[in-house]
Image: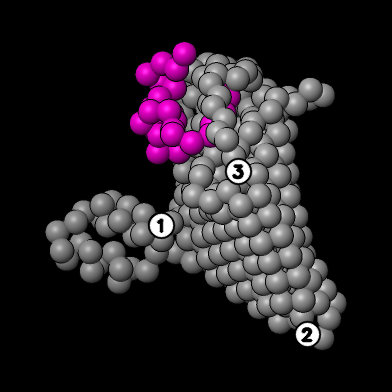
Amino acid sequence: MLNVLDKEMLEELAGLHELPQGAYNIRKNGEKAARRTTANIDIITKEDKPGIDVVVKPGTVGESVHIPVIITKEGLGDVVYNTFDIGEGADVLIVAGCGIHNPGEADSSHDGIHEFRVRKGAKIKYVEKHFGEGDGSGKRILNPKTVLDIEEGAEVEMELVQIKGVDSTQRDTQVKLRKNAKLVVVERLLTHGEQFADSVINVELLGDDSSARIVSRSVAQNKSSQTFHLNMSGYARCAGHIQCDSIIMHDAHVQSIPRISAFSSDAQLIHEAAIGKIASEQLLKLMSLGLTEKEAEDRILKGFLK
């Protein structure tokens, strides 16, 4: 059963006030807490290792899968392997992510490894949110890995968000795009205190007329540290764009390392990267409207990460 804390965390992670109508698998403290399948979406427990297989039937349209993970114990090291098979012509929403509430002194962590096969002509929107909370001194550690093989004519939209409270994260996203496949990634990340975040996104454009766009936005506060490796390689007639923007505050440290590599004369690849502080004129304009400096700063950061 889900208690009040569990429900609050699910609302933060996935906007769920109650259990969703579609397919879902809720994992709590390393165990299955609730599951529901539909006629078109099956969820099967793996037999060889912790995790699930999510199978979406060809032609499934307008359905959703929620697979949140919640951890409410100290000292728990959770690892899960999830595999997704998205059938031809399907069009579905997948909402994942993990929240850690650590009440104690021992570190709690979650490593989520997700592998997707998005079959010909399918479309998915994948939303992954991470956050940490709790009064304990133990760290909240999240290390997501996502691997996608996007087949001919398929489209993937990814929204990767780290909301707050994660002490350490190593994010790894690997994508291969076949002929006429499309990818859009929007990454938003906030660190504060002495938190650390390392994000790697590797995209390989393998097929003619494939395209990819990566947008990474982050805010680093206090003494936190962020490193971004955004890599895009074009092996065919393709188009790709990387945009990485960061706001740095206080004594934080940010490294942005975009790289584009062309292995075909028909590849068109662009990268942009910018790191800077909040412009003083933005603060002054909002303060002239009656906001305090802190309120104005929060308003600017919220809009930047939206």
Pointer 1 residue? 306
Q: Give the number of the mark in front: 1 or 2.
A: 2
Measured along the vertical axis of the image, is residue 73 above or below residue 157? above
Identity of the amino acid at label 3?
Answer: Phe
Which residue appears farthest toward the top when viewing the image?
1
Label 2 crowding class (10 Å Cα cut-off): few <14, some 14-19, many 20+? some
Q: Earlier in the sequence, mark 1 or mark 3?
A: 3
Pointer 2 residue? 266
Identity of the amino acid at label 1?
Answer: Lys
Quadrant position of residue 296: bottom left
- Tell whether 55 sits left or right of 102: right
Q: Earlier in the sequence, mark 1 or mark 2?
A: 2
Q: Nearer the viewer, residue 209 or 221?
A: 209
Identity of the amino acid at label 2?
Answer: Asp
Residue 192 in the image, given as x and y percentages of width and height: 48, 43
Marks 1 and 2, Cα distance to the nearest angstrom? 34 Å
Measured along the vertical axis of the image, is residue 111 above or below residue 78? below
Secondary structure of the residue carrying numbered label 1: loop
Residue 239 in the image, given as x and y percentages of width and height: 68, 77
Residue 254 in sight: no
Residue at the (37%, 18%) spot, across then down: 4
Q: Is residue 238 magenta?
A: no
Residue 150 in the image, given as x and y percentages of width and height: 72, 58
Label 1 crowding class (10 Å Cα cut-off): few <14, some 14-19, many 20+? few
Pointer 3 residue? 196
Measured along the vertical axis of the image, is residue 149 above or below residue 180? above
**Which residues are drawn in magenta?**
1-28
Total tally of numbered discs in the picture: 3
Residue 304 in the image, given as x and y percentages of width and height: 41, 61
